[in-house]
Image (cartoon, rainbow, N blue to C red):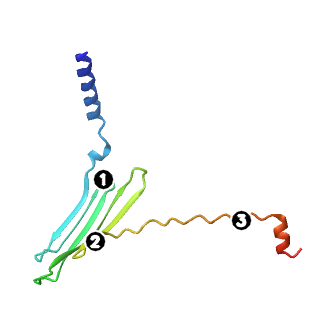
């Protein structure tokens, strides 16, 4: 019984190791980064699996008590349904927030009420 358990565990670990998703093989296609002397920065990258990211940070109120870096950026990826997702964000002295608009989802029009022939006739004055 002990041998069966050991062999089963070995088979599971080997097959799990062989079934690596394509995501693990993603490569960086492009990368750019700049850091300015005042601490401002910007960077961007794109990977072979469709992930992108850009971010910019700018020094605000340099030398003052409320000095901070205001950040804005975005990233994209493909979700499990194959849809491209884009997220936009910002961060400043008031905190981090997602700026991505919610997708438009129209409400279905309500079904018109069914009117009996007598009601229609009375509305028409008959």
Disc nearest the viewer among 3 and 2: 3
Q: How many marks?
A: 3
Q: Is residue 100 left or right of residue 10?
A: right
Which quarter of the figure is the C terminus placed in?
bottom right
Local crowd size for mark 3, using a 10 Å CA cut-off: few (<14), some (14–19), many (≥20)? few
* Nearest to the observer: residue 67 or residue 44: 67
Residue 98: quarter of image? bottom left
Q: Earlier in the sequence, mark 3 or mark 2?
A: 2
Residue holding disc 1 = 48
Does residue 90 appear left or right of residue 107 in this picture?
A: left
Front one among 106 and 40: 106
Give residue 90's mark: 2
- Location of the N terminus by quadrant is top left
Q: Is residue 80 left or right of residue 113?
A: left
Could you tell me how far apart the alpha carbons at marks 1 and 2 are, in whole angstroms? 26 Å
Q: Quadrant of residue 17?
A: top left
Residue beneath the point at 30% across and 60% down:
52
Mark 1 or 2, which is nearer the eye?
Answer: 2
What is the crowding at mark 1: few (fewer than 14 residues within 10 Å), some, or many (at least 20)?
few
- Secondary structure found at label 1: loop
* Helix, strand or loop for disc 2: strand
Spot occupied by residue 112 in the image (x, y as percentages of width and height)? 70, 66
Q: Write the residue at 33% across / 55% down.
A: 50
As displayed, is residue 29 above or below residue 94?
above
Say which label, 1 or 3, has the lower sequence index: 1
Distance from disc 1 to disc 3, alpha carbons, whole Å, reads 53 Å
Q: Secondary structure at mark 3?
A: loop
**Residue 125 position within the rendered picture, expressed as x and y whole percent measured from the top left:** 87, 76
Q: Marks 1 and 3: which is nearer the front? A: 3
Q: Which of pointers 1 and 2 lies earlier in the amino acid sequence?
A: 1
Residue in the image at 40% along x and 50% along y? 80
Residue on which the image places disc 3: 113
């Amino acid at each position: 019984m002990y041998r069966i358990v050991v062999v089963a565990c070995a088979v599971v670990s080997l097959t799990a190791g062989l079934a690596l998703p394509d995501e693990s093989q993603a490569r960086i296609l492009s990368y750019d980064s700049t850091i300015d002397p005042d601490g401002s920065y910007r960077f961007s990258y794109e990977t072979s699996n469709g992930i992108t990211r850009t971010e910019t940070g700018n020094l605000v109120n340099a030398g003052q008590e409320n000095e901070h870096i205001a950040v804005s950026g975005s990233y994209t990826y493909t979700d499990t349904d194959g849809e491209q997702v884009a997220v936009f964000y910002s961060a400043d002295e008031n905190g981090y927030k997602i700026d991505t608009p919610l997708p438009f989802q129209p409400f279905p029009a309500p079904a018109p009420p069914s009117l009996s022939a007598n009601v229609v006739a009375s509305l028409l004055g008959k």
